[in-house]
């Protein structure tokens, strides 16, 4: 699997909570793309969490055009700002942050995610007490307080069938049907999981060093799944901690990409999600499973077309989905390589 890389020239401000070359307990990395107003709220909350703490904040701006970077420079001068000349994507931008980070622990925080009071301190305390944990996440809630999937199972063909068919949503309390999102589990109980979403993730530095950071072939989506899988392969545990609360809007950056279809159900850009899914399956499951994943999703939408013949909107939505599956397959040669970045 190969991928063309764009130029990544950056300019970095020198104002930091922890001076370059010094060590810190935690480095919080926020990747921004056209989310200025939400980003301001995120950083204001983060500033409160870092007050008096041994930590630093690094904001990597992915060539935003809405003044996000200038806002950070003017209103949060204590945070290190990296201005990228191109949109690097989530994985590569976080890797730039990793290169600069001085912390023993690294935290990924989406610009549309807001830490509960004391959440960062609780996450650090958990990591200190559990040296075998390489990566962990917290309890994600939407703005109405509803729980979002916060500790999940790795993708598989069985999980694809359960989610795509709607059985997972219809029977969330079932250990079989609700297995992918672990919707059957008690959200108040900490638990080992396969992977945690990148909206909030805390990573032990030695786990990051052993895994080599994010695979930059994933421009957006599946990069955290891949990282957690490699961490588990290196002998680290991945955990969900319910007392680390985070309010997460979801899809704030993706919604600004007006040229692509956005799925409100998953808060994702459909074409990019499909590309990354194919890359992931090819990398971890091989060619046959990759073909199986694409075929399963395509067959499901063909069935929906037949069932919804008298419902033009649903009929057309499934036709578009089949077209996007074909395009993603062509774009990635069946998951063999990623398209030229930025996507």
Image: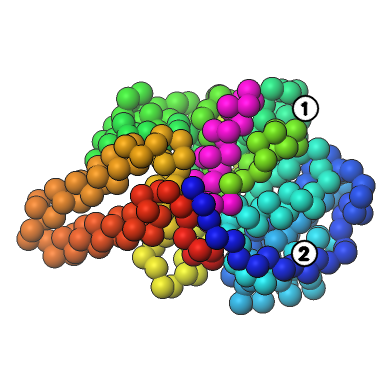
Could you tell me residue 82's position as x and y percent? Answer: 75, 64
**Lower sequence index among marks 1 and 2:** 2
Tell me if 158 is positioned left or right of 4 in this view: left
Classify residue 32 as left or right of residue 205.
left
**Residue drawn where x is 14% and y is 48% of the image:** 303
Q: Of 282 and 323, which appears nearest the observer?
A: 282
Locate residue 45: give its quadrant. Answer: bottom right
Residue plotted at (20% across, 51% down) = 301
User: Percent position (x, y) of residue 107?
Assistant: 70, 44
**Residue drawn where x is 35% and y is 31% of the image:** 178
Residue pointed to by mark 1: 128
Residue at (81% x, 43% y) in the render: 103
Provide the secondary structure element on which disc 1 rests.
helix
Q: Residues within 10 Å of mark 2 (few under 14, many from 20)?
A: many
Q: Measured along the vertical axis of the image, is residue 110 above or below residue 210?
A: below
| Displayed quadrant of residue 177 | top left
The answer for how far apart the CA atoms under marks 1 and 2 are is: 28 Å
- Inspect the magenta stretch and tell me whether residue 222 lies in it: yes
Residue 110, how many percent across, how many down? Answer: 61, 54
What SS does tag 2 mark?
strand
- Percent across and percent down for residue 30 are 68, 56
Q: Is residue 29 visible?
A: no
34 above or below 157? below
Residue 81's label in the rendered image is 2
Kindly indicate the quadrant of the structure image that contains residue 308: bottom left
273 left or right of 217?
left
User: What range is drawn magenta here?
Assistant: 216-237
């Amino acid at each position: 699997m190969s991928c063309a890389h764009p130029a990544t020239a950056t300019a970095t401000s020198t104002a930091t909570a922890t001076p370059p070359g010094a060590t810190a307990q935690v480095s919080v990395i926020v990747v921004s793309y056209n989310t200025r107003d939400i980003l301001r709220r995120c950083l204001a909350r983060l500033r409160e969490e870092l007050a008096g703490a041994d930590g630093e904040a690094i904001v990597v701006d992915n060539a935003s055009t809405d003044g996000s970077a200038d806002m950070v420079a003017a209103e949060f001068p204590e945070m290190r700002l990296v201005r990228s000349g191109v949109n690097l994507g989530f994985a590569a931008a976080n890797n730039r942050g990793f290169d600069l980070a001085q912390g023993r622990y690294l935290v990924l925080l989406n610009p549309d995610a807001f830490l509960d009071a004391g959440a960062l301190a609780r996450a650090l305390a958990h990591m200190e007490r559990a040296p075998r944990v390489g990566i962990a996440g917290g309890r994600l809630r939407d703005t109405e307080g509803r729980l979002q999937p916060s500790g999940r199972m790795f993708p598989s063909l069985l999980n694809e069938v359960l989610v795509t068919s709607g059985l997972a949503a219809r029977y969330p309390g079932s250990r079989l049907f609700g297995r992918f999102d672990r919707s059957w589990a008690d959200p108040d109980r900490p638990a080992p999981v396969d992977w945690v979403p990148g909206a909030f993730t805390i990573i032990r530095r030695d786990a990051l060093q052993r895994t080599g950071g994010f695979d930059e072939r994933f421009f957006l989506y599946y990069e955290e799944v891949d990282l957690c899988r490699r961490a588990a392969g290196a002998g680290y545990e991945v955990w969900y901690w319910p007392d680390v609360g985070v309010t997460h809007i979801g899809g704030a950056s993706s919604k600004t990409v007006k040229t692509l279809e956005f799925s409100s159900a998953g808060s994702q850009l459909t074409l990019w999600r499909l590309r990354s899914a194919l890359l992931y399956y090819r990398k971890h499951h091989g060619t046959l499973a990759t073909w199986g994943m694409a075929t399963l999703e395509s067959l499901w939408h063909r069935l929906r077309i037949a069932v919804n013949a008298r419902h033009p909107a649903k009929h057309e939505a499934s036709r578009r989905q089949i077209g996007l599956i074909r395009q993603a397959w062509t774009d990635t040669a069946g998951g063999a390589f990623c398209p030229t970045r930025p996507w």
